Structure formats: structure tokens, C-alpha cells
Image (spheres, rainbow, N blue to C red):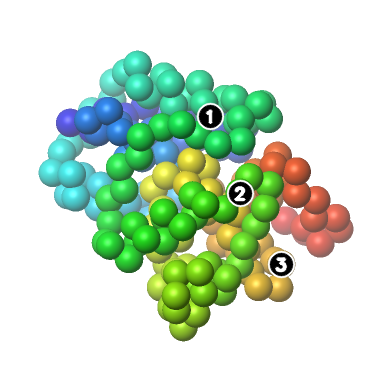
């Protein structure tokens, strides 16, 4: 069983999922790939979703609230990645991007050993089901521009601003 809970964040509604005491889902409720991500997780874990409050999910909410309040810079939660080996390698690399910093898709590709894999890296980044916890919002375009984000560019901008990034006039258009 994958226990689900919905939680309102300052940037949009999130869906949280716990499987065997591990976080397998922390994602934007209203994202374009919601059905595909949910099916991948259910099929990969061979489990069904059930709406239920758990102590573990309450701890996830507590840590998220600390993050949103500016009191937490990293998360201390057991994670369960559900995806291909390549996707998992990208998500593991995302965790290493420090709070308050960004990297580009090209830099991320290089750090994984193949700059020609930039499209595959971007696709894996977009398939991340552990938004915020696995900070895919910290990946930007090589020119410094904000690029796609499951929670929307406005949420990405606000998350980066929460972490102390200042974009000046450039992002006022979003």
C-alpha cells in the first residue's frame, strides 16, 4: 500500500506518498504528467494508493513546513526512487545540489559523465516524483533562464527566491 496525503504549500498543493516507511512521492498535485508519474510509482512498487494520514507523512509535512518557513536547508527522510537506473542516477545527483545554488542541465549532464545526454537528463529531471525534497527546481538553463518545472515556473522562481536567489528584473515577466 502507498499511503497518500495532500498538503497545501505556499506555492501549490502537493501530494505525498509513503511506501514501507519511505517517501516515494512529494509532487505537485496539478502537474501535466500526474497520471504517468502515479502509474510509474504504483507499477514500480506493485502497490495501490490509499488516502491515509500516517506518522511518517506528518513528519514529511513538518520538514516541508520548516523549509517553507526558511528554517530547513536539507531534508532527513528515507527516500524511495521509482524509475530507471538512469533516472535514479539523475535524482541522486540532484540531491547533491546545495541549498541556495543552481546548476544547468549541461553541468548536470557533465557531472553524470556525458554532456551529450542533456535531453535525457532534462527528461529524467522532469520525471522527478520527489519535488522540493529532490531539488529539481535548482536546475536552470545554461543561459541562467528558468526552464520547465512540474509545479510551474512561478513556483520554481519562488522556491529559488526562498533559498536566497535573486533574479532581479529578468524574472519579473513570469
How far across and how far down the image is residue 68, in percent? 63, 30
Q: Residues within 10 Å of mark 2 (few under 14, many from 20)?
A: some
The residue furthest bottom is 116
> Which corner quadrant of the image does residue 1 belong to?
top left
Q: Does the rendering let one see residue 28?
A: no
144 above or below 35? Answer: below
Q: Residue at x 45, y 50 (%)?
A: 31
How far across and how far down the image is residue 49, in percent? 23, 34
How far across and how far down the image is residue 117, in percent? 43, 78
Q: Earlier in the sequence, mark 3 or mark 2?
A: 2
Residues at marks 3 and 2, CA–CA distance in whole angstroms: 17 Å
Q: Secondary structure at mark 1?
A: helix
> Which corner quadrant of the image does residue 74 belong to?
top right
Q: Residue at x 42, y 39 (%)?
A: 26
Does the residue at mark 3 contact the one at mark 2 (Cβ under 8 Å)? no
Give the label, 3 or 2, closer to the camera. Answer: 2
Residues at marks 1 and 2, CA–CA distance in whole angstroms: 17 Å
Q: Nearer the viewer, residue 110 or 24?
A: 110
Say whether residue 142 is left or right of residue 24: right
Quarter of the image that includes the C terminus: bottom right
Q: Earlier in the sequence, mark 1 or mark 2?
A: 1
Q: Which mark is residue 64?
A: 1
Does the residue at mark 1 contact the one at mark 2 (Cβ under 8 Å)? no
Q: Residues within 10 Å of mark 3 (few under 14, many from 20)?
A: few
Q: Nearer the viewer, residue 155 or 71?
A: 71
How far across and how far down the image is residue 90, in percent? 42, 61
Which residue position is annotated with label 2?
98
Residues at marks 1 and 3, CA–CA distance in whole angstroms: 26 Å
Which residue position is annotated with label 3?
144
Q: Residue at x 41, y 54 (%)?
A: 92
Amino acid at each position: 500500500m502507498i499511503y497518500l496525503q495532500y498538503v497545501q504549500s505556499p506555492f501549490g498543493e502537493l501530494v505525498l506518498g509513503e511506501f514501507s516507511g519511505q517517501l516515494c512521492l512529494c509532487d505537485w498535485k496539478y502537474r501535466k504528467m500526474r497520471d504517468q508519474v502515479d502509474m510509474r510509482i504504483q507499477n514500480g512498487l506493485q502497490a495501490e494508493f490509499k488516502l491515509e494520514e500516517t506518522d511518517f507523512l506528518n513528519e514529511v509535512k513538518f520538514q516541508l513546513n520548516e523549509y517553507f518557513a526558511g528554517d530547513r536547508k536539507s531534508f532527513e527522510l528515507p527516500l524511495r526512487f521509482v524509475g530507471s537506473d538512469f533516472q535514479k542516477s539523475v535524482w541522486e545527483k540532484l540531491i547533491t545540489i546545495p541549498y541556495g545554488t543552481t546548476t544547468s542541465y549541461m553541468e548536470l549532464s557533465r557531472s553524470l559523465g556525458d554532456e551529450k545526454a542533456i535531453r535525457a537528463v532534462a527528461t529524467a529531471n522532469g520525471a522527478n516524483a520527489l519535488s522540493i525534497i529532490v531539488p529539481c527546481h535548482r536546475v536552470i538553463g545554461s543561459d541562467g533562464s528558468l526552464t520547465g518545472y512540474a509545479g510551474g515556473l512561478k513556483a520554481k522562481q519562488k522556491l529559488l527566491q526562498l533559498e536566497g536567489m535573486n533574479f532581479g528584473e529578468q524574472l519579473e515577466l513570469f
